[in-house]
Amino acid sequence: QKILASGSLEYNNKKQGNYIVKINSNGTRDASFNNIGKGFFRTTVNDVIQSADGKILVGGQFHSYNGLKCNGFTRLNYDGSVDNTLNYGGLNGFEGNNNGEITSIETTSDGKIYIGGSFSTFNGNPAGRIVRINPDGKKDTSFNIGEGFDYRTAYPGRINDIMSLPNGYVLVAGFFSTFGWYNRYGIVALDSQGNMAGFPDVGRYVNCLKKQNDGNVLIGSNGNTTVDAVLRFDVNSWK
């Protein structure tokens, strides 16, 4: 089994990795992955996941991959080449605060993709820190969050983690203080249409989410929560 590694790395075993590398089970670099391209140039990859079909979804602060424009997000084939079936519609992708940085990606059982970060627009249209796209890259307009996260704040935050749930809901965690017109700190649950479905009061800074086998969710923060740096919640209690 191979491992995908990403970040602000430039070298792996003294060979240029360009912010994402595939590593063999013995720790050596898989030279067949993107072996002819320059990858993401002088930037940071924040999240990389592999979807059920084997495609690789990559998010970060980059603006190109192997010389092709892609603001913050792209999808790669298993060998590291660009998946040309992802099409934003001829526009710019993600832009906004911090150059439209992507910090979290999550897929759904039907192949749709949640993307979160510090961006404020997607293809030139408002997108308040999170958007859901169809497998072809176009925005899923059935997911409507209105103004989204931190729309009216002087120093808007970002989405740090997204978790899909079996009931079609999605948990959104990060550094934020509002959702729409309401004060909502650190984490909210949204239904499949983008409506707020729950809100546990855990504080403003939430870094990560982890689902347990019993359906409970672990919430990790920097310690600035109402309880502690690691909390456990039953998602059904938020409704």
Image (cartoon, rainbow, N blue to C red):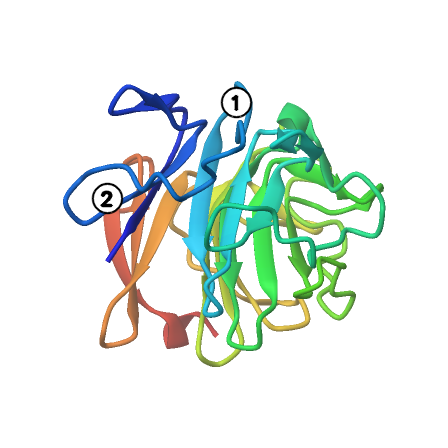
Residue at 37% from the left image edge and 37% from the top image edge: 21
User: Could one spot residue 154 in this view of the protein?
Assistant: no
The part of the image, by quadrant, that contains residue 6 is top left
- Image quarter (top left, top right, bottom left or bottom right) of the N terminus: bottom left
Residue 17 x, y percent position in the rendering: 39, 28
Image location (x, y in percent) of residue 128: 70, 45
Q: Is residue 120 visible?
A: yes
Q: Nearer the viewer, mark 1 or mark 2?
A: 1
Residue 224 placement (x, y as % from top left)? 33, 35
Q: Secondary structure at mark 2?
A: loop
Q: Which residue is mark 1?
A: 43
The location of residue 30, given as percent across then percent down, is: 31, 42
6 and 197: which is toward the camera: 6
Instruction: Inspect the image, locate mark 2, and give the three-letter code of the amino acid beneath it.
Output: Asp
Residue at point 57%, 71% (across, down): 111
Q: Is 103 situated left or right of 71 in this image?
A: left
Question: For residue 126, what is the image quadrant?
Answer: top right
* Amino acid type for the residue under numbered disc 1: Thr
Q: Residue lying farthest bottom?
A: 167
**Residue plotted at (75% across, 54% down):** 87
Question: Which residue appears farthest toward the left when viewing the image?
Answer: 26
Q: Nearer the viewer, residue 126 or 232?
A: 126
